[in-house]
Image: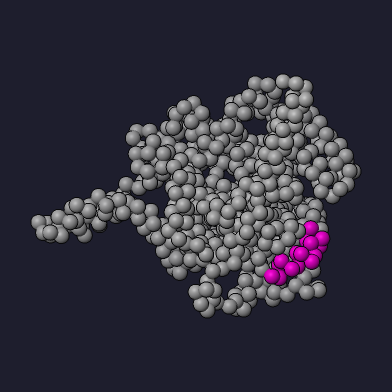
Amino acid sequence: MTATGFVGDLRQRATALSDIRRTAYAVLFGDRLGLIVFLATVVLFGLVWRTAFLITDSYTLANGLYSLSNGHVALTDAVYGPGLETPGANRYGGQRFARNYGVIVLSLPVVFALDLLTAVVELRIALVALWSLALLAFVVQCGHYTDNEWVSVGGSVVVLGLFGLNVALAQPLDAGRTHLYALQLTHLLIAAFTPVVLYRLFSRMRTRRLGFLSAVVLTAGTPLAFWASVPKRHVVTGTVVVCIAYCLYRSRMPTDGSLITQRRTFRALAYALVGLYAWVHAPEALLLCVAVVVVDVPTAQDNSPRTLARIGVVFALSLLPFIVTNIAISGSPIKPPRVISRSGSIGGDIAGSASGDGGGGSGSGGGISRTLLAPLFTLIERGMQPLVLLSGELIRGLDTIQQQPNDVYHAFVRSGNASGALDIAGEESVNLSLLESAPVLVAMVGALPVLRRLRLPSSMGDRVLGADRVVDAFAVTAFVGVVLLYAGRLPLHAQVTARYVFPLYPLGVYLVMRLPAVRESLTNHWRVFLWTVTGTVLIGGQLALIFVALTVNGIGEAFQLHALLGLTIAVPLGSWAVIGRSEGMAGQTGAVLLGAATGVTTVFLLLTSIEYYALGDSHLLPMMRALAELVTLY
């Protein structure tokens, strides 16, 4: 090969790599601002990352990842926790199995990467370096976005100083817990895409500014940062819900991407996400599947047999990991690990009633027909069983709302000293309600005057909804479905911030940002909103810190103080949302109230991570550990 040919080949390879990089960049983040949102959330999540177990269920996931990394599906050794009989472990065939195998498998490459890092450098230094690189990338991207070189230069100096500070304060990190760290890092990265996808959704619906503000509200105004590094399904569910909404929106709009050129591909992706999520949590995936079908099929422009068949094939393929895992564990394609230890009685009840109805009449022609069709009836019955169980749970939730409104009130509005809000010892009220942990969601009451002005479709032609209305319908359907699914179980201890209904946070933020008054107030007064959030965190955070240190005795009182602060700001915010005005002073007032509600949640999350649930000062970043050691409030 000549020198000219070699140079030409290098240029072609460089061009191909550049095209791949641009495609990956567009698919993952959309644009530079989307990348900035991702990096900012990763940096924030790293600040509050604690390298310890918050929930005992995580022991099961860590042991499951350890076993799978050693080639075993069943739990083999209790490397983490007191033993294999931890919450979430299910017994079948004399062995115990974990749950959420989708996340466990996704964490396998991270385990191997951390093991390689451990062989080269001390693990804490490696993770601190990764966090510092994320922060450096953030300030550099901000410099490019603002076209200000001083932002990049000054930010780089700050990053270098923080890295040196962390290295100076660093203590060895237990290298034997790489499976826990891998799970935490996997969940953290998945959670970081939740505000990114929400930003991209609103950027296409409205403007990039509104998309960015929606990402700020979701990241700072909900408990997303608190749960981001906790190995539980909750943040995964939140990301999946937002991704489904994004796919439904794109399926109704002309495509403009280089990778996906047909709208029906996005429609199929919405179902594929549901199928893949079944590998993590099958009951919630079934609920999301019902929500997608109920909204998508009646409002789609093309429901031809060919189109539906393609969607069905994609959905079936997305279920393959779920089905293969179930067959490997229980021998049944529809029995996930989380139900194998208790589904026998439920399935037996359904099967028993069905067989009882089918008894008698043997010897007739109809009996022969039923005998010949028995395998088909059995298959249909087994296929319908999950839907029957889901319907029963939703009906149970509706009955709870009607018959036990106090429990619903304590779970979603005011926790107080309700028995379910107490900790496991029954002494401290440390579990906030949905509204207490995210007071910005109270703005959803602003939908009441909007609904009064809503015009219902008058003909079938009007029922082909626009892209934004389809997402609205999905968000409302999924929101109501999650409420009904868990209404019969709440409130519970060990929730902290209503984690079982975590999908309500991104869904609620979406619905809030869709309100005209909220949208116009934030668009016209975005500086007021951002300065209010900043002031609430920096000034209000110090005041809250002093007040807790001087007046509070115990974590229960501290949590209830934050609960009252959240409800205090929720009352005027809800009143403003119901009025629904965004002109002039009313718009500025709304921006201030939205900013204060967002900032109050951020203050609670920071104090919770630093003091209330410091978990033995187990913060990943040494500077955060040192800060937690200095702050002693009670």
Q: Position of residue 320 (x, y in %)?
A: 44, 42
Q: Residues in magenta?
A: 516-530
Quadrant hosting residue 48: top right
Q: Is residue 46 above or below residue 523?
A: above
Q: Nearer the viewer, residue 318 or 515?
A: 318
Q: How is the image coloured?
A: one colour
Magenta stretch: dominant SS?
Answer: helix
- Residue at 70%, 42% in the rendered image: 22
Q: Is residue 257 magenta?
A: no
Q: Nearer the viewer, residue 181 or 211?
A: 211
Query: Along the horizontal axis of the image, is 19 left or right of 260?
Result: right
Query: Along the horizontal axis of the image, is 474 left or right of 26?
Result: left
Q: Is residue 524 magenta?
A: yes
Residue lying furthest right in this view?
A: 150
Q: Nearer the viewer, residue 196 or 32?
A: 32
Q: Is residue 359 above or below residue 149?
A: below
Residue lying furthest left in this view?
A: 363
- Residue at 65%, 48% in the rendered image: 258
Q: Position of residue 382 (x, y in %)?
A: 32, 51
Quadrant hosting residue 204: bottom right
Query: Along the horizontal axis of the image, is 323 left or right of 242?
Result: left
- Residue at 58%, 32% in the rendered image: 109
Query: Along the horizontal axis of the image, is 339 left or right of 190?
Result: left
Q: Quadrant of the N terminus?
A: top right
Q: Position of residue 46 (x, y in %)?
A: 70, 40
User: Does residue 539 appear anywhere in the picture?
Assistant: yes
Q: Position of residue 570 (x, y in %)?
A: 68, 65
